Image (tube, grey):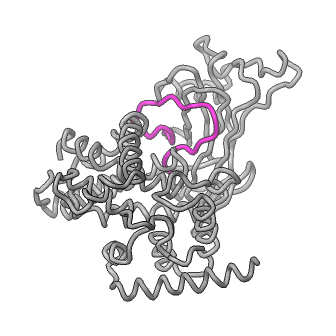
Amino acid sequence: MERRDIEQLYLRIGPLVFRRCLRLLRNPESARDAVQEVFVRALAHASELTWDRECLPWLYRVATRLCLNRLRDARPLQFQPGEDLPESAPGGSLEHRLDARSTLLALQKEVDEETWTVAVYAMMDGMTQDEIAELTGRSRRTIGKRLAEVERRAAALKGESA
Amino acid sequence: MSADPRGDVGGGCPSDFALDAFELEGRPVVHPLRQHLAACPRCQERMEERDQARQVFRREVYPLTVEAVVAAGAGAPAPGARRTPWLLRWALGGAAALALVLVGLWIGWPHPDPNADGGHTGLDGIKGPPAIQVFVKRGERVFEIREGEPLRPKDRIRFVVSLPRPGYLRVLSLNGDDATSYYPPPGATPVRLPAGRQELPGATELDERAGPERLWIVFSDEPLAFEEALARMRRRLAGEGPASSTGAESETYLRLMEFPKEAGAP
């Protein structure tokens, strides 16, 4: 691929991936590092990607997995008090978003990785079940079951902390 | 937690995923989201935020990352083209070679004399030393490693620095005659880092060699070429006086720490 092609791709798609990584990592430097790594991986799969709407689920999956792994591995770095307040989420009150984030962090220890990823898509990203199904390659019914499990676990956590 | 596991969006607003798809489609004039976006002030704000984020990316992310991305894509097929198997193998081999990395250590900095110059270090006018931490990922465990604690082959290490002022940083490794740059990556141009706490991009995987490893940090007001930083390092190791021999002592910190690295499987 010519340098100019890569630069144009990066300028066109990079901001979307950067926003995704920043939303999860809450740290501009970490998000900058992550978007670079996502693109390095994407270019290694260039023959499989169309670089249009069709590549978005692939980019989301890779970026999400990368960022969640980093959050898991580097939580002492990423979750300093006062540093993990959500940025402008697409909706909901600040209290609600804080509650959702703290619940997600607690849930990470309670459910398997796939279920936790589904929970992130739903609770942090506000995705529909159809969107989550597209991203994960699972049926909508499976997503519904995962989310029901998340609901149960979250309710149990609430009960424990009350 | 909300009773609605969808959480954030609500009100029929599209998710970020939907808006990303809308953008990748070129924000078409005729699109199912158009009607909602025209009527929803909150989503209009979201679209404005996306435009701002695009500018932030162009200004603060793209310049620092594009070279690595371009390097990774050098062997990739053009958009819409098919890649031949041998080229794929070549590209993957190249990526593996680029990923080859080295040794890692915990770095410390000279402690300033609090009584000197009103709390200044006397070396470069910095009040208080830059702080550097090294975090290790060993298997599934991530922890901070401190001076004297052994590293193991295949450990992955990552640096977090706290800089009292903007400047240029190099992290160099020297093992016998072999020298390399952990940060910035070999061949990359040093970038000016802002003051404050920050992770250095990229992780380093340690090699298989056992024995003490040496790592140097060079922090300066002006960018130093790898060769120059390496020359200063070698002069220091040879006991040839101060860290810098160019009269730039007031601008440069050099600090060596040795760490044991255990042999054998991680």
Q: Residue furthest top?
A: B247
Residue A87 vs residue A62, the one in the foreground: A87
The residue positioned farthest toward the left in the image shown: B81
Identify the residue at image location x=83%, y=15%.
Answer: B117
User: What main secondary structure does the magenta stretch of the protein show?
Assistant: loop
Q: Is residue A138 above or below residue B17?
A: below
Does B41 sit left or right of B28 as displayed?
Answer: right
Q: Please tell me whether residue A134 is drawn above or below residue A54 in the rendered image.
A: below
Name which residue lies at 27% across and 60% down: B33
- Which residue is at the front of the view, A68 or A161? A161
In terms of image quadrants, where is residue B53? top left
Q: Is residue B257 above or below residue A60?
A: above
- B40 and B27: which one is in front? B40
Which of A24/B45 is in front? B45
Q: What residue is at 68 percent from the left and 49 percent from the top? A: B259
**Residue B211 x/y as whole percent:** 63, 52
Q: Is residue A84 left or right of residue A25?
A: right
- Segment tinted magenta in the rendering: B181-203
Asked whether B183 falls inside the magenta stretch, the response is yes
Q: Is residue B255 left or right of residue B87?
A: right
Q: Is residue B133 above or below residue A50?
A: above
Whether residue A65 is visible, yes or no, is no
Residue shown at 37% from the left, 88% from the top: A141
Question: Which x, y percent locates residue A23?
Answer: 48, 55
Q: Position of residue B113 (x, y in %)?
A: 84, 25
